[in-house]
Image (spheres, grey):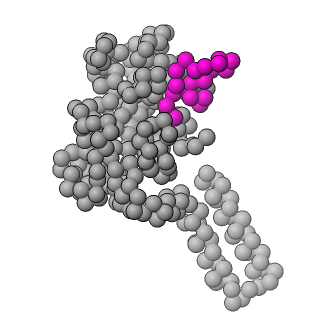
Amino acid sequence: MSGIINFVIGVICIIIYFCNQKFWFADLYIPISYLPLILIPLIENRKNINFNIQRLLYWNKEIRVSMSYVYRICVDDKYLLVQNSHRKTTYQFVGGKYKYYKQSESELRKLKMRLDDKLGQGFNRKNDIAFFIPAKNLKKFIDWFDSQIYRDIDCTREFREELLQDKKTQSPVLDEKLFADIKFMKICTVKTPITQSPADSGWKCLEYKQYDVLEPMFTKKQEEALRKLASSDSDYVKWVTKDDINSLGHKNGAEQKAFSINEHTKWCLSEEYSNK
């Protein structure tokens, strides 16, 4: 994308140069020379422009914000997905919501936060950064989130909860001792525009979501254990290809999907939001 931006800016500068050489716009030369300085930030910040326009359009409406992180775990070109806790026939990358701490509650109250009581506030969901705020406060909310002050920044919690600890009816997926020490690197952050929630989600609201995409850096022994796990699927764990994710679980030639793949999994694989 940066290459396209530089190309556009270069073309503009060349046009200005030749116009000046051919027509000698003496009075206009200086103001025209400022044109790239005006266009460059507009081109580079076009996503922010769209974001701010949306905020203005929905200024007094309430939106649901959801800030998450996911682990992109791949072994021999196959990706590890786990069962969605709410929809048993849907699978997604390991991951979950960031959490806010008690010290941030006063700041979030200033932003007119309203808790999302649709999923309840059980132990696993308590203090999730998934709640409602007015659209006019979205920029301030994102600034607070990006500051990382008084909020969860330990991205290993969901890895432990979803793969190393006992699930309701089964043993841990991976050996807790072998995977006790996990290092990871951040790949990107996928941001959605303000959109209407999917019809089948049950929320019926405007929403804004962010996903930090992380890749664990496993040791050779950890990779061997994952490779062994990848030899078979279970009700809780599925190993899928890139094509499976891009088609959201639809197999070529199959009349019906054996299972569905959550849409944000596709975004986190391609590293960008898409409504297609």
Determine if the magenta segment contains residue 154. no
Q: Nearer the viewer, residue 174 or 129?
A: 129
* Residue sitting at the far left: 103
Q: Looking at the picture, does residue 123 appear above or below residue 191? A: above
What residue range appears in magenta?
245-265
Q: Nearer the viewer, residue 109 or 179?
A: 109
Residue 246: image location, x then y, percent: 59, 31
Q: Nearer the viewer, residue 211 or 90?
A: 90
Q: Looking at the picture, does residue 275 appear above or below residue 138? A: above
Residue 48 visible in the current orientation: no
Residue under the point 54% across and 44% down? 273
187 horizontally vs 163: left or right: right
Residue under the point 24% across and 33% down? 122
Q: Looking at the picture, does residue 276 appear above or below residue 61? A: above
Determine if the magenta segment contains residue 247. yes
Toward which corner of the image does residue 155 lie, by quadrant?
A: top left
214 horizontally vs 261: left or right: left
Q: How many marks?
A: 0
